[in-house]
Structures are given as C-alpha cells and as structure tokens.
Image (cartoon, rainbow, N blue to C red):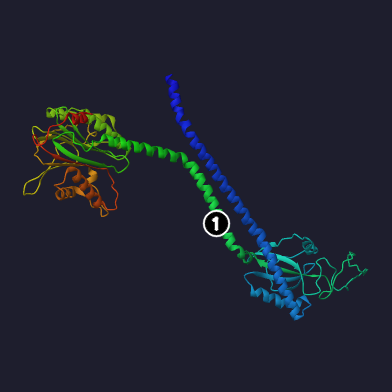
Amino acid sequence: MGRASLSIMSEYPEQRVKPKYLWFRISTALGLSLGLLLLVQTLRTYYYVSQSLVRQEAQREADRRMQSIGRAARLTGSREPATLAPVLRELVHESPQQLAWIRILDMDGKVLAESDKVAGAPSYQPGQLGKMLEDRGRRADERETRSGKVLVVVNPMRFGPPVFDRRGPPPGEEEGRGPDGPGRDNGGNGRRGGRGPGRGAPQLAEIGLYFDGVSANFLPLRENLIVGCAAAIALIGAVIIIALRFRHYMRGRHIEEELSLARRVQNDLFPTGESPSGMLSFAAKCVPAYQVGGDLYDVFETDDGEVGLVLGDVSGKGLPAALLMGVVQGAVRASCITGPASCHEQSTERLNHLLCMKTARERFVSLFWCYVDRSAAVLRYVNAGHLPPLLIRQRQGAASEVQRLDSGGPVLGLLPGARYRQAEVPIQAGDLLIVFSDGILEAANSRDEEFGEEGVLAAVERHRDLAPTELCAAILDDVRTFLGKELPQDDQTLLVVRLDVAGSISPLSADLAAIGRA
C-alpha cells in the first residue's frame, strides 16, 4: 500500500501539469505554422514581383519606347533603319539609368542600326528571332553585362502605317500579291501584307532595359515584402525559442513560488512587534537583498523569565544562507543559556561545533547572543565575531554614552576548537541597545561611501526620543536615503531595544509567556 501511494504521488504532478503543456504545445504548433505560412506566402509574392511583374513592366516600357521610335520615324520621314541611329542614341542618352541599348535587327539577327556599341548585347542564330516572335508567351531575356543585369525585349518594328503583321508577308510585295500569284504570300498562306519601309525581311527592335531601373517602380512593395519576410522569420524564431525555453521558464516560476513561500516561512520565524516581556520594548526589521536572506534575529523569553536577544549574519545571500539561518535560530532556541556563564559559553561552543561538522568551511555565522536579567539589571552576552552592538546610555543634559559590546570569540562554523567568553554589562532604565548586520554599516552610495557606524549614531541622536518602532524605521529610512538610487548589496537587519529594570514596568502575563515559549 505504501509503494502504491508513493507511485500515485509521483505520477500526480505529471497528470496535473500535462493539460497545461498540451495547450502550450498546440499554441506553439499553431504559431509555428502561421509563421511558416506567412514566410512562404511572402517569399512567393516577392518572387512574383521580382520575376513576373518586373518583366511585365519591362515589356510595357519597351512598347512605350517603340512608340517613341515610331513617332520619331514619322516626324523625320525615315524609311531606312540606318537613318534612325541618331534617334536611338538620343533616347538612350535621355534615360541612361533605364536604357542599356536599342538596336534594329533583321530576321537573321543582323544589326541594321544601334544606339551604341554595348558589350554583352546578345547575338542570334538564323531563325532564332522568328521562333521568339512566334512564342506568344515569351518573356524578357535576362542577361548579365558589365553595367549590371539587363532585360532584353524584342518587338517587331512599327514605323507607322502601314503596319506589318508579326507573321505577314515580306515587305516589298504589293498588297494582296505574292511571288506565286495574287492573294498569296511567300509561304502560300493567303495572308495579306502591306508595304513597309524598303524591301527585304521585316525589321525588329531590340531594347535592353536595366533590371534595377525597371524594378525601381516596385521598390516600396519589395521593401514591404522584405519586412514581411523578416517578421515571419522573427515569429518563427520566437516560437522556437519559447518552445525550447518553456520548461526552463516553468521551472524558474516554480522556484520563484518556492522562494516566495520560503520568504513567508522566514518571516514567520521572526518575532512579532509585541514584546515577550514587560521589561523591554523592541522593534526589528530584516530587508533581504534577494527574496530570502541569511540574516536572523529573535527575541524570546526563557524559562527563568529573562529575555533572550539574538541577531546573526550567515555568510552569503539567498536560499543557502536562509536554510543555515533556520538551523542556527532553532539551535539557539533549543539551548539553555540561563544560569551560570558557563552554560551560555558551552551552548555557543556546541553550536560552533555543530556548524563546523555540518556545513562547508565557506559557510560561517557571526552571532550576537545575549539575555537581559531584569532582577540584576544586567545584560549578559556572547559576541561571536559579529559587529559590536551599541549600548547607548542617555544622560540628562549631557552627550549620550556609547558602549560597544565586542567580547566573546570568533565566528561560528569556522574553527572547531574555538572558545567563547560571556561578558556582562549593567543596564539602566531607558538604555538603548542597537544591534545591526553588516548590510547596514557597509551600505554604499554612488560615491562608494559607506553608511558606517557614524551614520547609525547620527540617526539615533536625531531620533533618540522616539519609540523603538519609529526609531528603527527612521534609521532604515536614513540608510535608504544615503543609498540613493543604488541597490543594497547585502541583507540589512536592524534590532532596536529600549531596556528597563525591575519595578519600572508591569510583570509578564501568562499569555505572553506562552507565546514566548512557543
């Protein structure tokens, strides 16, 4: 039964997450299909524009040039192709970016007139031009020249009326007569012809158009198609990247949720703002650099009615430091620190031995650990490598007296055989105990200046008459103001305690004692 339960528990997350993955896979497939469809359609449109529309535009441009040649022939009365050479050169020189050459050819491909000698102009075999003209679906021929890509268009010459049919009788025959008799042409097809300019075979006009010059009319459309292709490729790439990184993203979200839960658990470990004893009031705040931090503080009541105060700093930041923080806090709560000083010292040494055995050497803890004896009006403490807390005594009409609590020993978890010594200081009603982590003192602004102990003392001096809650908030506000736009690089923890002695405040209630022992 136990194994079956474990099997069900291990399979349950898979079954629960599977529908989410299914919808994601469907959406990814649809997005990828849409991107591919858009890319294919855009490429087809681009190919159509580059191949078909540009060539159709070249054919129309060639027809317009043919009309210009025909008008020039009528105006000049030219009937011989050689007399049109100046007209051809003028037309090419007027549009050098669009026209490569214009030539007049006979049916055998012989050049009768041309605009200029052009390297790369095609040559034709006998009968080749006739086959080209018979091909009604012919396209402009594409050739590479030194000046660039050229589209070559061949059309029958039209000097003006009468105009020859593309497959009509040779010029020079009378209308309705051929060499073999009336009503028949040279091929005996019975087609009627007309009289052209001079005798011999029909003339053809060959016009070379620069591809870039013709395609310039479609430049905005081609740019839009290029943008469409880029957008389709970007969509496909984005979908692929999302599909590949989805599991990592979900894992990161899961870790974020766990860190958020760990943050709530860590906050629950910290004491509330209510004092566990009627002999002091306190306020504390922990501002982690990340979602969870490695700083800890605790305020609790012992079985003898004394109040324990703890503030520690685990090396490093983030989740590993937070886990070690929980271990230290639990060990401190479980230790007996009341009674002789040796009990407090031995508890600290046992905690140090535990950390040395169970943690890596790069993980250590600085800890300030004290308890307040109300009846004797003393504070007994062990400082294990922590920044010295400040005990500030208020003097009537004089400057405050500051005592640094630095006795104890090295940090915990680094030296297995380290020894610790408890120290004792007297306290008076109204004394302030300020305990902080290095994230407070080492907070650096944009000029690389640190807040330091001087900043803490200056803040306390400005707000010395405030309650601990307000004083704690005022010090942290001063730290944030000092940082400016800079982000804190370490956890910031502050504990402010206003001490009192026996007889100054009402005794502890049973309910508060139960809360302190919980």
Towards the viewer: 146 or 446: 446
Name the residue tied to disc 1: 227
Q: Amino acid at mark 1?
A: Val
Residue shown at 59% from the left, 63% from the top: 219
Residue shown at 55% from the left, 42% from the top: 29
Towards the viewer: 226 or 501: 501
Q: In which quarter of the view is residue 288 placed? A: top left
Mark 1: few, some, or many residues within 10 Å (few <14, many ≥20)? few
Residue 272 image position (x, y, % from top left): 23, 37
Residue 502 image position (x, y, % from top left): 9, 34
Up/down of 159 relative to 386, above or below: below
20 on left or right of 186: left
139 on left or right of 185: left
Residue 396 image position (x, y, % from top left): 6, 47
447 on left or right of 174: left
Residue shown at 10% from the left, 47% from the top: 400
Q: Quadrant of the N terminus?
A: top left
Up/down of 214 relative to 243, above or below: below
Q: Residue furthest bottom?
A: 76
Towards the viewer: 94 or 200: 94
Q: Can I make out residue 48 in this image?
A: yes
Q: Can I make out residue 361 in this image?
A: no
Q: Secondary structure at mark 1?
A: helix
Towards the viewer: 16 or 47: 16
